[in-house]
Amino acid sequence: MSSKTKEDYEFADTVFVRDVDSRVFQAISYKCLLGIEGVELIGGNILDSLLGRESASERIKGITVDQDQKNHSVNIKIEVNVAYGISIPEKSEEIQSKVAKELAALTGLHVASVHVVFKNLITQQPIEKLLDNKEPEDEEEMEKQAAVEYTDEF
């Protein structure tokens, strides 16, 4: 009787599949943004996003993921607000390189593009309020504006 080993048998080719959900890409990108000074993700409650209370299509508002299964690559679009005085080209490059490096290292996939969209400026005061509060031209207008701004009425 001949003794056969494992190598003597032919097995069908095994295909290994690895899928990474969009939420994983969003979470990695979000963690990268937390370490970058002068930017913040556009509006939306991050707690609701992390708890899954938002729509399934966009769990973390401002981070959109498009996976290309055929080419094993991913495209990321990140929408952020930027602080006034920050160089937008330099900040864009910082975001893109940090996100691409982390995504590639943690998922093993090729990052085809990181599209950064700057949606708004972060200022001490909302820009609309700054535009509405023009400097009064004379002393009488200053007193009227001060009276309106500082009232005891609720």
Image (cartoon, rainbow, N blue to C red):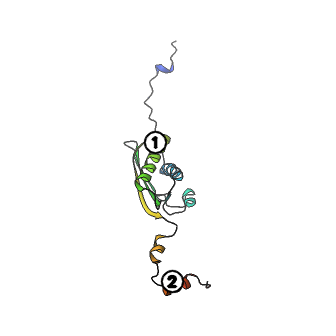
Expressed as whole percent of the image width and height from the top left, the position of residue 60 reads: 50, 57
Q: Secondary structure at mark 1?
A: helix
In this view, 99 is above or below 81: above
Q: Is residue 9 left or right of residue 71?
A: right
- Marks 1/2: CA–CA distance: 57 Å
The amino acid type found where label 2 is placed reads Met
In this view, 92 is above or below 137: above
Expressed as whole percent of the image width and height from the top left, the position of residue 70 reads: 37, 43
In the picture as drawn, the residue positioned furthest to the left comes out as 71
Which is nearer the eye, 11 or 1? 11
Q: Secondary structure at mark 2?
A: helix
Quarter the C terminus occupies: bottom right
Which is nearer the eye, 54 or 76? 76
In the picture as drawn, the residue positioned furthest to the front comes out as 139
Residue occupying image coordinates x 44% and y 74%? 131
The amino acid type found where label 1 is placed reads Ala
Q: Which mark is residue 142?
A: 2
Ranked by sequence position, the earlier of labels 1 and 2 is 1
In this view, 50 is above or below 101: below
Mark 1 vs mark 2, foreground winner is 2
- What residue sits right under mark 1 in the picture? 104
Q: Is residue 3 left or right of residue 70?
A: right
Instruction: State which quadrant residue 49 falls in.
Output: bottom right
Expressed as whole percent of the image width and height from the top left, the position of residue 137 reads: 45, 82
Residue occupying image coordinates x 50% and y 87%? 140
Expressed as whole percent of the image width and height from the top left, the position of residue 139 reads: 50, 85
Which is nearer the eye, 22 or 79? 79
